[in-house]
Amino acid sequence: MRSAANSVSEHRDELVELDRAIGDGDHGENMERGFLAVRNQLELTVPESPAAALKSVATSLISSVGGAAGPLFGTAFLRASTAVGDAETLDGPTVAAALRAALDGVTARGKAEREDKTMVDALAPAAEAAEAASTTAGSGPSAVLRAAAEAAETGARTTVSLIAKKGRASYLGDRSAGHLDPGARSVVLLLNAFADVTGAE
Amino acid sequence: MRSAANSVSEHRDELVELDRAIGDGDHGENMERGFLAVRNQLELTVPESPAAALKSVATSLISSVGGAAGPLFGTAFLRASTAVGDAETLDGPTVAAALRAALDGVTARGKAEREDKTMVDALAPAAEAAEAASTTAGSGPSAVLRAAAEAAETGARTTVSLIAKKGRASYLGDRSAGHLDPGARSVVLLLNAFADVTGAE
Amino acid sequence: MKKIINAPADVVVDALRGMAAAHPDGLRVQTDPAFVTRSDAPVTDKVALVSGGGSGHEPLHVGFVGSGMLDAAVPGPVFTSPTPDAVQAAIGRVDAGAGTLLVVKNYTGDVLNFETAAELAEAAGVGTRTVVVQDDVAVQDSTNTAGRRGVGGTVLVEKIAGAAAERGDDLATCHEIAERVSANVRSMGMALTAPTVPHVGEPSFTLADYEMEIGVGIHAEPGRERVELESADGIVRRLLDPVLEDLPFREGDEVLLFTNSMGGTPATELYLAHGIAERMLADRGLRVTRRLVGPYITSLEMQGMSLTLLKLDDELRRLWDAPVRTSALTW
Amino acid sequence: MKKIINAPADVVVDALRGMAAAHPDGLRVQTDPAFVTRSDAPVTDKVALVSGGGSGHEPLHVGFVGSGMLDAAVPGPVFTSPTPDAVQAAIGRVDAGAGTLLVVKNYTGDVLNFETAAELAEAAGVGTRTVVVQDDVAVQDSTNTAGRRGVGGTVLVEKIAGAAAERGDDLATCHEIAERVSANVRSMGMALTAPTVPHVGEPSFTLADYEMEIGVGIHAEPGRERVELESADGIVRRLLDPVLEDLPFREGDEVLLFTNSMGGTPATELYLAHGIAERMLADRGLRVTRRLVGPYITSLEMQGMSLTLLKLDDELRRLWDAPVRTSALTW
Ligand SMILES: Nc1ncnc2c1ncn2[C@@H]1O[C@H](COP(=O)(O)OP(=O)(O)O)[C@@H](O)[C@H]1O
Ligand SMILES: Nc1ncnc2c1ncn2[C@@H]1O[C@H](COP(=O)(O)OP(=O)(O)O)[C@@H](O)[C@H]1O
Ligand SMILES: [Mg+2]
Ligand SMILES: [Mg+2]
Ligand SMILES: [Mg+2]
Ligand SMILES: [Mg+2]
């Protein structure tokens, strides 16, 4: 999680720029503030289980990010936490289930479909890729996350040519095309960070 | 008077620029508005005497220019009108007396001395030169006005290096040096116009 | 970036501190989480009105806290909606047991965060209703977008529903009146220049010297079109026509005309535009009987304006006229 | 030049027309010559207050016409003082026989034109007194200049002398009170950007991106110094120090703090600066008991602010608190 926070901080300006192009320029600031809160909270009390950790992340995000991204990423981590249940360590299928739950949460709250040029365009292929990878024999959590991150990256890249139908970028109409969606980019940053850490463990 | 109005209109932008450098940029607009009013008034009722004409100019200026220049030029023409008295045509000495009265009026109202970087730096040498020229045998009004206009021009040029002590430019302190005073420039424009017309008559 | 600030990240809290200092009698200000309440809240038996949203639109919402308008306002970071816990904390502070009406501008972030806040409040035993204001006719294709944005109409909803609450209407009635205002109000805005968000440091968009943006949102979201600068007559017509067509407003309708500065537009220009709008409305047979002119919902220092029209009925007019005492609106 | 106007030469009159439309009940607006009066003027037996000056500083003076403040305001062209006949016409309209107090900001043009107007009014049988406000401490060498300019203090003179007139004080007393405010008030301003006068079409001065002008006047006259941009703390200190030293204000003094926007500065920045000023004054042992925060004396769209301090006594505080109902100031 610390590495996710670092990655978000490092990419703050990139996210701000992406959001400035088709939104209101606060996404980098919002995410940085959120993951600083996450890190502080996790340093204060070490969670007892993966589910508790995910729930702590959700609460920190919801109460510090604001904007559209706060409730959406918050819901994603909250649903992931529920999906993980009382698992003590995360195996491949659990990771995949968590990502699927996260996706369902985001679409339930935000009502965005694929190709609406939102974080869903990264998260949906990530969840699918994770499921596919987890059914391959011998795929541990690290391989699943790596597959998810790669699919998210590809998915995020498709947002460039899309016309936004949800979120602030939708007001741009045709003019939203030609820009990467900042929320989708954040999904990629987070999944990459998780994959890196899990791989290194 | 019409030619004075034309000259002011032609130089509107120059006066605005001069005032923008060391004042608030309205002098050209103010003078143009004033002399338009003067012209309209003179077209409405043809004054019966030089004194009446000067008084009409004064009233038009006072009631249309505003700013510092309005009351000062207004007073100048008002005093000139009184000085001219019931003269039916203006000879050299009367012109000189009118300019002296105008100067006295301006200094009485505005309390500026020479070298304060105001219209006084053009009007004072003009009045002196007019007096000197009018005592030369055979100097008609046109020669007197020409001498006044030339002295005003030289006087106005001295304002460039001066530091303003009166009017809005005084707030600039040392920074007012290096710029021609717009009010002094207006005096030059007016005297030149009068000299041209009188010479052509 | 030229601003009178210390650290960009502290702007909202620093401004709230100044607001607390400036209005020691009327307002109570809390900074963590950040919200502003009227000093006499909770007001016994009164329905509470709570609004909020990203900062940078002042006086909306914090300037409208006071008797006859909002009980609490929850400012988020600049242009970013506040978090649910902040909203819930504000509700908890002002709810007097008669329930709380939430006034929400229609932006994904505001809607989602207030939704969660309402759930949290309900869980804590507070009855809530929510009105989502969406009066910006600049957003044309509302099915392929996040929907119409809440803009100038929000000020009118807060004033009128606030008056209803102040006279003792219950939650359902306050909500009904707020929805009635919302259903009868339409707005459109334009910009001559872009604002600069403190933590971004650069203008939100770039307009050439001869361009203006028609249909701009209060977060400097792009509008319907970017066109060459026109006279005030042309600008007002470009705002008024789509507003009039939308409801539609008809000949004989009694309306409130709200001419709003986006922040950086001087009073002279605003009054000038207001005069033109009044004349154009009169030409079309509408009766302007109430008006509001000033910077009430802004986008930082953006130069520009918006026009808001509300169709009045007797009750809405009476509630508009009812006394209000806030830092930004008083009569 | 980006402005919401039609012809630059018509800006003032067009804006007055809009003002008339916006405030049909409270104001009467005349355009030739241009002046604004409260609709119930002349008010029987009341001393009349008349002020005026170049336009572009709104709400000063037109926004302060109403009960408890000005009876008439006479707006000149943008940044140019009005002519004597316009001022005299306004005096003639509002004088009720109890005499008229003229509130004049100390600029050569204003002083001269109001002087002539007073002469004309006296000749027409109206008793007049004049207070010349000169509170701008940025002007240091007042013997080698046109003297200190009238800035923020003017708003306070108009409010307090207006309250004196409203309670029935005679002309001599209103004048004495106005002079008392004038003697006890000091201001200083700064700018981040320059305004553009409509008929000029270009900014009044040029500041680099990293520069600010300290001690600027409301016509964008240059200030004491042009320095590098600083934090809000630094800016407020640069304004407050010379103000405090000047009167001087001393520990224990009761003061009114007026934090003014030059026009283009958003409310957040203004409140933020106000909070800092309150803290600095508290640190020095001054007691701020009254405050005013907002854009009340502006320079078109100029970004920047000014701070004004008035030393209060019991009577001035009471007059400050007295009700006022104008388009820009109401309580
Ligand atoms: N309805 C939605 N469903 C899913 N994601 C959304 C939705 N609306 C916005 N987003 C995501 O949120 C991102 C913007 O987040 P952020 O800038 O923090 O919030 P805001 O738009 O309120 O300023 C967008 O890039 C997009 O990916
Ligand atoms: N006290 C004074 N005595 C004489 N002339 C003055 C005085 N003050 C200002 N002026 C003249 O007035 C001119 C400025 O006029 P103008 O720009 O029309 O008025 P304002 O300064 O009110 O904007 C200056 O250039 C100067 O020549
Ligand atoms: Mg954003
Ligand atoms: Mg000038
Ligand atoms: Mg945002
Ligand atoms: Mg001027």
Image: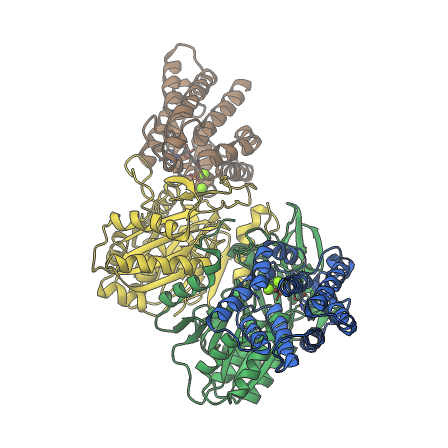
Chain colours: A blue, B brown, C green, D yellow
Ligand 2: which quarter?
top left
Asked if residue B34 shows in the view, the reply is yes
Residue C210 image point, x, y percent = 66, 46
Q: Is residue B75 visible?
A: no
Instruction: Pick whichever, B37 or B121, lies toward us.
Output: B121
Between residue C233 and residue A57, name the one nearer to us: A57
Q: How many marks?
A: 0
With respect to residue C60, does A160 lie above or below? Answer: above
- Residue B180: which quarter of the image? top left
Image height of B167 relative to A189, above or below: above
Extreme residue toward the top, this view: B137
Determine the residue positioned at 66% across, 56% down.
Answer: A18
Horizontal arrangement in the rendering, residue C203 relative to residue C64 (left or right):
right
Picture quarter containing residue B147?
top left
Residue C111 x, y percent position in the rendering:
61, 75
Residue lying farthest to the front in this orientation: A138
- Give residue C93's position: percent from left, percent from top: 44, 81
Image quarter (top left, top right, bottom left or bottom right) of the C terminus of chain C: bottom left
Residue D277 locus on image (x, y percent): 34, 57
Q: To which quarter of the image does residue C196 belong? A: bottom right
Image height of D242 relative to A50, above or below: above
What residue is rendered at 45% in x and 64% in y?
D327
- In the rendered structure, the answer to whether residue C313 lies left or right of residue D302 reads right
> Closer to the camera, C136 or D100?
C136
Relative to B50, say whether B34 is above or below: below
